[in-house]
Image: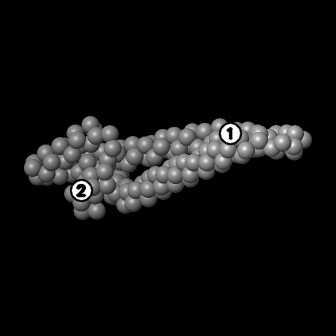
Amino acid sequence: MNEGLFDELKKVLSIIEEYKKDLETLGTKKEGFKSVNMHIELAIQESEEATQKIIENIMGIVSILKENLRIISEIPDTERKEILMKNTEDVIGKLTETLTLLEFQDIVSQRLQKISNFISEIEKEILKILILFGINRETSDKKKEELKEKLEELEWKRDVSQEDVDDILKQFGL
């Protein structure tokens, strides 16, 4: 009877050891989260900057074309004047339509921001698991209290800084 209990205990300890290894490998994934978030933020920023420049260029071109329309209106040759005015108005219309189509950029940016926030939340949850694991594993009451404070702070914090991540992982020797 004791042998069966001993075997079961060995199995449980083996499972616990596997979870321990899995938790320790989670700590190494932090760089991946950091890298993905950095690339998403960079994509958002570059996309917004490019869109802003395109909008500025289009607005500048429209302004020049409107000035051209004013000058064209002074041309005495009616036939050429009408052709130039129609063509210029068509170009202004297409540029205005292009401005409207650029609204997709805002939607893409919002989606990327949601993805970035989701990744940050996953990272935060992983850190919580690591802290809980550390609290249960820690023998020093002082260290346990520090980890509990970190956990509470993490619960209330919206964004987790890289310093927070590094600090928590250092406590685990990772």
SS of the residue under disc 2: helix
Q: Position of residue 71 (x, y in %)?
A: 73, 44
The reply, left or right, for residue 89 in relation to residue 127 is: right
Q: Position of residue 52 (x, y in %)?
A: 54, 48
SS of the residue under disc 1: helix
Q: Quadrant of residue 94?
A: top right
The amino acid marked with disc number 1 is: Thr
Q: Position of residue 12 (x, y in %)?
A: 32, 49
As rendered, which of 164 and 26 lies closer to the eye? 164
Q: Quadrant of residue 23?
A: bottom left
The reply, left or right, for residue 99 in relation to residue 38 is: right
Q: CA distance from mark 1 to mark 2?
A: 51 Å
Mark seen at residue 47? none
Q: Quadrant of residue 103?
A: top right
Q: Which residue is mark 2?
A: 167
Q: Is residue 145 visible?
A: yes
As rendered, which of 134 and 30 lies closer to the eye? 30
Mark seen at residue 96? 1
Seen as rendered, the residue at the extreme right is 79
Disc 1 to disc 2: CB gap under 8 Å: no
Total number of numbered discs in the rendering: 2
Give the residue at x 68% y 42%: 66
The reply, left or right, for residue 30 in relation to residue 72 is: left
The amino acid marked with disc number 2 is: Asp
